[in-house]
Amino acid sequence: MCGIVGYVGYREAYPVLVKGLHRLEYRGYDSAGVALICNDGGLNVYKSKGKVAELERYAETQDVSGTIGIAHTRWATHGEPNDVNAHPHFSESERLAIIHNGIVENYALLKAALIENGYTFKSCTDTEVLVQLIEYVQTTNNCTLLEAVQMALRQVVGAYAIAIIEKGDPDRIIAARKSSPLVVGLGNDEYFLASDATPIVEYTNKVVYINDGEIAVIERHKPLRVVTLDNEESTLDVKKLRMSISQLEKGGYPHFMLKEIFEQPKTIVDCIRGRINVEADNVILSGVIDNRERFLRAKRIIIVACGTSWHAALIGEYLIEEWCRIPVEVEYASEFRYRNPVISPDDIVIAISQSGETADTLAAVELAKSRGAFIFGICNVVGSSIPRATDSGAYIHVGPEIGVASTKAFTGQVTVLTMLALTLARAKGSIEQPLYLQMLGELVRLPDLLEDVLRLNARIEDLSKIFTYTKNFLYLGRGYNYPAALEGALKLKEISYIHAEGYPAAEMKHGPIALIDSEIPVVVIATTDSIYEKTVSNIQEIKARGGKVLAIVTSGDQTVRNIADYVLEVPTVAEPLSPIVSAIPLQLLAYYIAVNKGRDVDQPRNLAKSVTVE
Ligand code: F6R
């Protein structure tokens, strides 16, 4: 949450910073701001409530010259979203300006001490405390900005990625990180700084990821230096980005979300590439094979995740238990980390996270690690914090996901979990060869199946109009499609703001059936599987009470067609892979309902893409 950008070099900084903010807007869009050192050494700060476009409108009449600057797009934690609480924040003397992503947990204590020392505060943010503290330390110790940052950060409890510039010093940005991401791009005689690589990739593909406890000293015409809080020099590990600019643009679609839904046939190809060898009849997830003995020794697997990734984890539980016969527990990372769970060195903990930065999932990983478990990450963003904290893992390789609602990451996560379960089951000898080969074939066929499903687009767009003014929805599914129902409900509520609940279909009669009337549409995933008849009975129960049913069925189904009000046909696929197929019409349905309601689909209210705060 919150995106930070910085630039120092030979270009005008403002256009670089604003473009970078647009790329990071998915991380928060409550307010935006920029600080620039102009050519006479003066420090200008411009900020405004609302999206980056508001900042741009405001800055049209301001002096935005200068070749060094920092900028911020905010997801509010401390203090309401308004102009005053927007970053950058000045220090008391307005000599320093700071941007910050994270939370200072002991800010109240620090603030009280600073007030006692005569400091005054304009905003309600924890960030202003940081910059005041740094100025206070620098003034009282008469030291350099770097030394002040090192001393001040030792007093700070919490998470931060910060960048600071100083009036009269047009050559230097000091940036530091603890538990919030920070990456420096190395150009030719210029440097870029950002929360992730998306603002950097159009200028350079060389980056250095800053580690926890490190401070980057970014100086014009000088090599990048990275030091610790104790001033020890770190060795630079320069990485090459494999991202392209076209991946960061809408490519003719009205929203990133729609683009990302339509990318899924291709992202599944990218996800399975090099991992399935059809000639050798093999699925190989190297992160599992390289740690074969460790996986074979596992008495239990715990999967930790949040939101959509947690829904993928539930499917992972079914897959692994079915084929590998290893007990699996799925945990919300936020609960796991705070409830003293039983974890033994024989456990494997799988952390699933698109962004690789979710604070709760990262904390759950650290907890499990401290208790000796082996940690396997399933992430999308290469080089992000979770993959760097794990023992092994597999990227889903679906490319940057920019729409706040997760779509292609979900299908990528389930695909990787399927490959993980197959790899492990074969290593254990717990899966029959014909079943293994059937699943391998289904994985290879999946991109074509998804192309077929996407042909429902126009029909779903039409159908969505019926539901524009609906106030509540229920989503039901059973078995592998129960998590898909949860995911469908989450998609709808987060982008359309319509209340929606997902349930296992059989749980209906234990309570939710009381909600059924002619006003509440019930979306039922009723594809032909081992519990199809049971699901049909559940649909009958809804119809008997006057409910309206929109059913996702397998192509050619007549039974459900005869009882449901609306049906969407999806191609036949093996049951364990069916949630990947059923997820897509549910994504499209949520998308079009939100568009009909005029919602901001890619940037829904109150949300941010990476939840880097607790
Ligand atoms: C929903 C959504 C969120 C994320 C959750 C975890 O569409 O995107 O529920 O799935 O915040 O994020 P990651 O996967 O980045 O850890």
Image: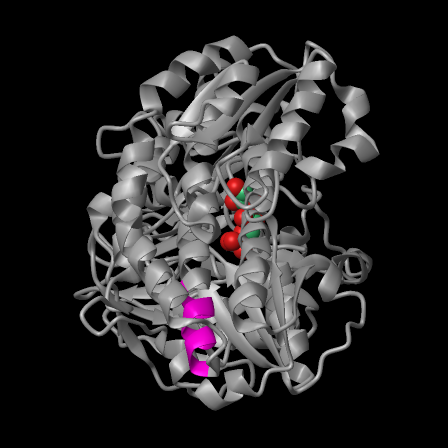
> In the rendered image of this protein, does residue 474 appear above or below residue 434?
above
> In the rendered image of this protein, does residue 229 appear above or below residue 589?
below
Residue 362 point in image, percent of width and height: 59, 66
> In the rendered image of this protein, does residue 59 appear above or below residue 120?
above
The front one of 435 and 332 is 435
407 lies left or right of 224: right
Quarter location, residue 165? bottom left
Q: Of helix, strand and loop, which mostly describes the magenta segment?
A: helix
26 lies left or right of 245: right
Instruction: Write down the region rendered in magenta.
Output: 419-427
Residue 437 point in image, percent of width and height: 33, 65
Q: From where the camera sits, is residue 44 visible?
A: no
User: At 61% across and 72% down in the image, what residue appears?
Assistant: 365
Quarter location, residue 457? top left
> In the rendered image of this protein, does residue 482 appear above or below residue 302?
above
Residue 422 lies in the magenta-colored region = yes
414 lies left or right of 66: right
Instruction: State which quarter of the image contains the C terminus.
Output: bottom right
302 lies left or right of 58: right
Residue 74 point in image, percent of width and height: 54, 42
